[in-house]
Amino acid sequence: MRFGSIGGVIVLLWLILGGIAAFERGYFRETGDASCAEAGTVIVTVVAGPLNWLGVNPKITCDIPEPSK
């Protein structure tokens, strides 16, 4: 039995469960005005995987400077 294939399956399942958690939280609804913080929150929610159901609620904040005039 190869460890690489088992590890890959585990990572894939982890990310699928994270995607399900993000979907349950409504992060994939189209708002038309996505921001850096919203995208970051979706990404870390997916990466957190099953930990979302144990109370992990990752949030990202990011401040992008406005361009000078």
Image (spheres, rainbow, N blue to C red):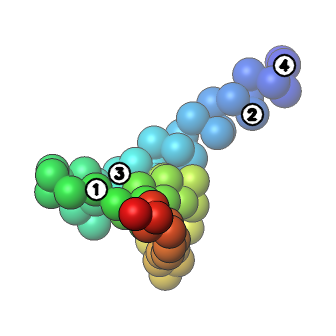
The answer to whether any part of residue 41 appears in the image is: no
Task: Decide which of tag 1 and tag 3 comes sooner along the chain.
Answer: 3
The mark that comes first in sequence, 2 or 4, is 4
Q: Judging from the image, what secondary structure is the residue with disc 4 in?
A: loop
Amino acid type, mark 2: Gly
Type of amino acid under label 4? Arg
Q: How far, Cα to Cα, is label 1 from label 3?
A: 20 Å
- Residue 9: quarter of image: top right
**Percent x, y of residue 48:** 57, 61
In the image, 1 versus 54, the foreground residue is 54
Residue 19: image location, x then y, percent = 40, 48
Q: Which residue is mark 4?
A: 2
| Residue linked to disc 3 | 20
Amino acid residing under circle 1: Ala
Give the number of the mark in front: 1 or 2.
Answer: 1
Q: Around disc 4, counting alpha carbons within 10 Å, would you say few (fewer than 14), some (14 to 19), or many (20 or more)?
A: few
Q: Is residue 10 left or right of residue 59?
A: right
Label 3: few (<14), some or many (≥20) within 10 Å?
some
